[in-house]
Amino acid sequence: MSDAVLKMTSVVKRFDHHEVLRDVSLTLHRHEVVCLIGASGSGKSTLLRCANLLETINGGDIELFGQSLLDPRIDPDLVRRHMGTVFQSFNLFPHLSVLDNVALGPVRALKRPLNDVREEAMALLARIGLQDRAGEFPDRLSGGQQQRVAIVRSLAMRPSLLLLDEVTSALDPTLVGEVLDLLSDLAKSGTTMLIATHEMNFAREVAHQVVFLDQGVLVEQGSPEEIFDHPQHDATRAFLGRVR
């Protein structure tokens, strides 16, 4: 059996007459971290939204464990249970405690016993050093703490992969490190992740593959060393020159 978790083949996405993704193909394997880099508007976020069926593609195919997600019999909600998605905004429920935010999905969607879920949620919060804040409401936490809770909330659903969309871009620079440290720990533990990021040093250190998108086109893909030290395309070199 192939170890491919997510396979996107010749994906095209248009908004009206504007082509946001043009013939994009990539494969994410089990335990692999792939970082999407590129300027704002290059298509990174749209690609993630297409992967978890928040956007409908106009061409190509998307497969999860070899099953095409374009099959009309596919239930998008069931697909999303296999994909934990974390956006720039934390999207925590303000009226629920940190613990209840983490536990809600497994209890409601997976029908798991409340006691088991709460025990596991506390273990996840301990993993990120926030077990003592379990009873707090989200507005009592810093932005970095809220984003870490949002990531842990996705992990509580036991997803096959995590999709992360610029999860540090809404944070004060002093808080970025604590979120990236968590993602680094997840990478080391073998969590399969597709990450859109502006953090080049993080991508260099954590990614198995780096994908450079420019105006909706996958220009270049390779190991961090290949992309950052030996880019082959002028567009890649120009982008890296700007962000450095």
Image: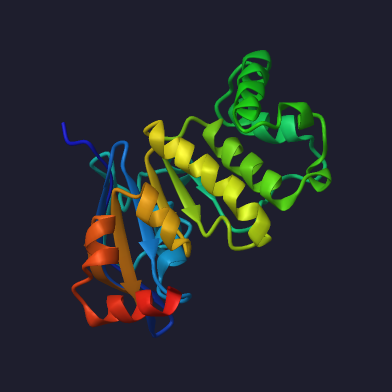
Relative to 52, residue 30 above or below: above
Is 137 displayed left or right of 47 in the figure? right
Relative to 186, residue 91 above or below: below
Camera-side residue of 95 and 108: 95
Where residue 159 sits, quadrant-wise, is top left
Residue at image location 49% in from the left, 43% down from the top: 183
Residue 185 position within the rendered picture, expressed as x and y whole percent measured from the top left: 47, 36
Residue at image location 32% in from the left, 36% down from the top: 31
Residue farthest along the left direction in this orientation:
1
Is 144 displayed left or right of 20 in the figure? right
Is residue 12 visible in the rendered image? The answer is: yes
Camera-side residue of 210 and 94: 210
Residue 202 position within the rendered picture, expressed as x and y whole percent measured from the top left: 44, 54
Residue at image location 23% in from the left, 68% down from the top: 220
Relative to 140, residue 209 above or below: below
Residue 127 position within the rendered picture, expressed as x and y whole percent measured from the top left: 59, 28
Give the quarter of the figure containing the N terminus.
top left
Residue at image location 74% in from the left, 44% down from the top: 93
Query: What is the number of callouts on the image?
Result: 0
Residue farthest along the bottom direction in this orientation:
17
Where residue 217 sits, quadrant-wise, is bottom left
Camera-side residue of 85 and 57: 85
Give the quarter of the figure containing the C terminus.
bottom left
Is residue 20 visible in the rendered image? The answer is: no
